[in-house]
């Protein structure tokens, strides 16, 4: 009997056996071709890597080994790893997405049923809202007045939340308990204990994770009610955190990766209308400023980030805060500020797509925008205020890298009309980047062929442990240690395994290759021993004699166990 293993995510447990069933169904070429174009190259397929810019293809997909590897970026793995990387998903989310696409029924542990019961509640509640939209002329008229097409309503699954009483009746009729509904943020309690549906008489915008999982809702009133917020979102729950979600990202991510650009706007309807007009890289924050929690999703694919915010005071302030944070993190992009009273949705409705395209193509860089915004807060005709403006702008520049500080010192001095020597930048020590790759090492095909043979025939590992050490490897000690440690999914090993120019040896060839490396090592040791000045002549003579004895045995084809003499 097989003992079930599980993959856990927020107490959601997927049985390993069903994951293996999915893996057996997947074909790495088929999966990756859904995202990028692959071209046949011998037994493999090649493409330009989707994870970094390159002029010549270094991204290789091996159908025989069911893996991919980028020789420029260093990344590699199987079908699931690719979907995780490309879609910015964690492992369980990628498993669930692929299972849905390949019609594989996943099995979950008893303890995870509640989580999937929650998912079913939200999915069905969304269907309820969509049905109510089809029955509500007022909501349909609102969408029509804003220029929203039926196709956009379908694409973003827009709906309408009826009166609270009707929603509560629906939840009760469908067996949704009060605690469940409270936990999912779809009902709330007033101070006097009255229960009500959180979304009532509003058009609804379902909010999905990057992987397409429904986790909450946004809502907007369409009447003239007073003393209620025009926009609301689901509250923070066990699955919904508006500070780390971007509305529409699940629909925009393919364009973001292909185009290398993401447009961030303030409103859900702006996203819907921009997509309708062909700007399909648009997303929106959920009633909150851009936060550090958004950084991981924004970094995916390293796109140019366009902040497209309203021209009112709140919009400009939000743009400055976001641009400051992004420039401090070394991220690339610019800012577009719309005229007061105008938003992207209005411009699309009015057929101003060309004007939008021009705005998005001529953004003001983050640093320029921040410097100009800071200075605009002061009366620079007043010398005292001018000095304060300089101090505040320099304080901002101090958050940037030394290179950017040097680049923008002249810009700041020119904008303020002061001499550059008055711009005093404090050079902060820079953190060492972990993303900088070490210089490319010399490749040793003899060593690589041994490693690839060990990957193909793991039984040989025990055999070599008795005769060699990583010391005899000149260029690929790390890879040897990885294969001995059974780290077979490490990108370095995947890169070796996928290469057609590295040979897998037969048993006899493997033995001869080990002997070759041992002879090379001991010949190098002879030269090294001779150069050591701290050894006496008698010590050198003894060690050299021992090494020559080993070399003679190796010359005769005998596999001599490795021995370190000093």
Image (spheres, rainbow, N blue to C red):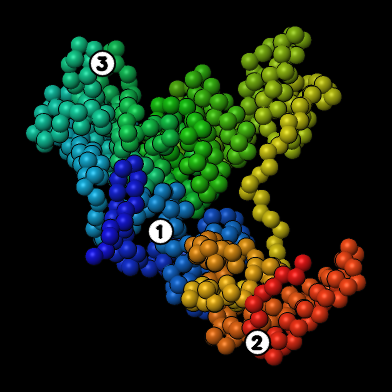
- Measuring from the top left, give residue 193's x and y in whole percent: 19, 15
Q: Nearer the viewer, mark 2 or mark 1?
A: 2
Label 3: which secondary element? loop
Give the quarter of the image for residue 418. top right
- Measuring from the top left, give residue 507's x and y in whole percent: 54, 85
Q: CA distance from mark 2 to mark 1?
A: 45 Å
Residue 558 shows which numbered tag? 2
Q: Nearer the viewer, mark 2 or mark 3?
A: 2
- Measuring from the top left, give residue 217's x and y in whole percent: 30, 33
From the viewer's side, name the closer residue of 104 and 449: 449
Left or right: 401 as drawn, with respect to 151: right
Going from N to C along the chain, the mark reached first, 1 or 3, is: 1
On screen, residue 531 above or below 141: below
Quick one: quadrant of the C terminus? bottom right
The reply to whether callout 2 and callout 3 are in contact (CB within 8 Å) is no
On screen, residue 445 above or below 114: below
Going from N to C along the chain, the mark reached first, 2 or 3, is: 3
On screen, residue 177 above or below 532: above
Residue at horizontal 69%, vertical 73%?
Answer: 563
From the viewer's side, name the closer residue of 220 and 289: 289
The residue under label 1 is: 80
Left or right: 133 as drawn, with respect to 257: left
The crowd level at tag 1 (other Cα within 10 Å; few <14, some 14-19, many 20+) is many
The residue under label 3 is: 225
Going from N to C along the chain, the mark reached first, 2 or 1, is: 1
The reply to whether callout 1 and callout 3 are in contact (CB within 8 Å) is no
Residue 99 showing in the rendered view = no
Q: Nearer the viewer, mark 1 or mark 3?
A: 1
């Amino acid at each position: 009997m097989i003992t079930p293993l599980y993959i856990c995510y927020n107490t959601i447990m997927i049985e390993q056996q069903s994951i293996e069933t999915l893996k057996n169904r997947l074909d790495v070429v088929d999966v990756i071709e859904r995202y990028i174009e692959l071209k046949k190259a011998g037994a493999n397929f090649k493409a330009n890597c989707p994870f970094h810019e390159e002029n010549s293809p270094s991204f290789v997909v091996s159908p025989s080994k069911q893996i991919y590897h980028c020789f420029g970026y260093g990344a590699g793995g199987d079908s699931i790893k690719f979907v995780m990387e490309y879609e910015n998903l964690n492992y369980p989310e990628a498993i669930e997405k692929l299972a849905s696409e390949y019609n594989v029924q996943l099995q979950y542990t008893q303890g995870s049923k509640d989580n999937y019961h929650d998912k079913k509640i939200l999915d069905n509640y969304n269907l309820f809202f969509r049905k109510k939209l089809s029955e509500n002329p007022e909501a349909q008229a609102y969408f029509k007045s804003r220029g929203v097409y039926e196709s956009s309503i379908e694409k973003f699954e827009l709906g309408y939340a009826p009166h609270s009483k009707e929603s509560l009746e629906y939840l009760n009729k469908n067996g949704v308990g009060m605690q469940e509904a409270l936990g999912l943020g779809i009902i709330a309690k007033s101070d006097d204990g009255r229960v009500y549906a959180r979304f009532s008489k509003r058009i609804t915008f379902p909010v999905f994770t990057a992987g397409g999982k429904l986790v909450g809702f946004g809502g907007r009133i369409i009447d003239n009610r007073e003393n209620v917020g025009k926009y609301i979102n689901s509250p923070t729950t066990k699955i919904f955190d508006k500070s780390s979600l971007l509305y529409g990202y699940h629909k925009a991510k393919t364009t973001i990766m292909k185009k290398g650009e993401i447009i961030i706007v303030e409103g859900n309807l702006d996203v819907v209308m921009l997509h309708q007009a062909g700007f399909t890289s648009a997303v929106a924050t959920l009633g909150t400023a851009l936060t550090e929690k958004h950084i991981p999703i924004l970094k995916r694919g390293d796109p140019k980030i366009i902040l497209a915010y309203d021209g009112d005071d709140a919009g400009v302030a939000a743009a400055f805060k976001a641009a400051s944070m992004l420039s401090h993190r070394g991220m690339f992009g610019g800012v577009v500020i719309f005229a007061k009273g105008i938003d992207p949705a209005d411009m699309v409705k009015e057929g101003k797509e060309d004007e939008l395209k021009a705005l998005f193509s001529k953004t003001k860089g983050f640093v320029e925008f921040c410097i100009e915004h800071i200075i605009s807060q002061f009366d620079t005709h007043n010398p005292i205020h001018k000095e304060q403006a300089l101090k505040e702008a320099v304080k901002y520049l101090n958050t940037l890298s030394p290179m950017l500080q040097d680049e923008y010192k002249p810009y700041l001095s020119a904008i303020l009309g002061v001499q550059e020597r008055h711009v005093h930048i404090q050079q902060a020590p820079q953190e060492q980047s972990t993303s900088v790759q070490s210089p490319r090492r010399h490749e040793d095909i003899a060593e690589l062929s041994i490693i690839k043979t060990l990957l193909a025939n793991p039984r040989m590992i025990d055999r070599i442990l008795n005769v060699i050490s990583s010391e005899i490897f000149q260029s690929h000690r790390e890879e040897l240690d990885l294969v001995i440690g059974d780290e077979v999914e490490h990108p370095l090993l995947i890169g070796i395994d996928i290469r057609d120019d590295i040979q897998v040896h037969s048993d006899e060839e493997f033995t001869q290759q080990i002997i070759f490396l041992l002879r090379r090592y001991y010949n190098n040791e002879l030269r090294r021993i001779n150069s050591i000045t701290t050894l006496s002549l008698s010590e050198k003579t003894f060690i050299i004699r021992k090494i020559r004895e080993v070399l003679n045995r190796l010359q005769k084809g005998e596999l001599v166990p490795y021995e370190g003499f000093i």
